[in-house]
Image: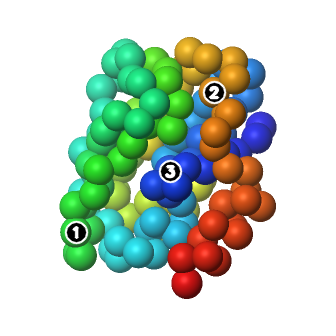
Amino acid sequence: MDIFYTKDHEWVKVEGRSGVMGISAYAVKQLGDITYVELPEAGKEITKGVVVCTVESVKAASDIYAPVAAKITEVNSALESAPEKMNASPEEEGWIAKLEISDPDASKGLMTAAQYDEFVKSLG
């Protein structure tokens, strides 16, 4: 399973046409303690770059954008009662949604983990 990142700090793990998305550890660190996650709706078709859900923290509310065009097949409902899972494990237990990716070349235009690490370092 390959992982890719956006400049808005979303990640997507891709395996064939299946994917899982969430926000990066860097994004979680910037937001502070996450207190609420407004999850997307399972079954919804999303296009790359549209707002998928909202994450609220002690610092701010942030929109989370779709890293790829896809159909949401499942949401992480555990985040409704335990949004802190996103703080503890943003790229594992803190995933937001599982996806059926529309475009087999969906990862084009996204950053690899190494590229994302360099991008984050460039932010200071």
- Which residue is identified by label 2? 106
Q: Position of residue 103 (x, y in %)?
A: 61, 17
Q: Residue at x 45, y 75 (%)?
A: 29
Mark found first going from the N terminus, 2 or 3: 3
Q: Is residue 73 visible?
A: no
Question: Mark 3 falls on what kind of element?
Answer: strand
Nearer to me, 3 or 105: 105
Position of residue 95 measured from the top left corner of the image (x, y, whole percent): 50, 47
Q: What distance separates the C-alpha of mark 2 from that of mark 3?
A: 14 Å
Question: Element at badge 2?
Answer: loop
Estimate the spatial distance between the alpha carbons at disc 1 and disc 2, rounded to whole Å.
30 Å
Secondary structure beneath dot 1 equals loop
Of the numbered discs 1 and 2, the one sitting upstream in the chain is 1
Q: Which residue is mark 1?
A: 60
Look at label 2 and name its amino acid: Ala
Identity of the residue furthest to the bottom in this view = 124
Residue type at mark 1? Ala
Apparent side of residue 106 relative to residue 38 in the rendered image (left or right):
right
Q: Residue at x 44, y 68 (%)?
A: 28
Which residue is at a point 61% across and 50% down the rendered structure image? 5
| 20 sits to left or right of 82 | right
Q: Nearer the viewer, mark 1 or mark 2?
A: 2
The x, y position of residue 118, in whole percent, is 70, 69
Q: From the image, which quarter does the C terminus lie in?
A: bottom right
Mark 2–mark 3 CB contact (< 8 Å): no
Above or below, 102 against 97 in this view is: above
For residue 10, which numbered disc appears in the image?
A: 3
- Using the image as rendered, state which of residue 81 and residue 86 is in the foreground: 86
Q: Is residue 113 visible from the viewing direction of this image?
A: yes
Q: Of the residues tagged 2 and 3, which is closer to the observer?
A: 2
Which quadrant would residue 121 be assigned to in this image?
bottom right
Query: In the figure, residue 34 lies in which quadrant?
Result: bottom left
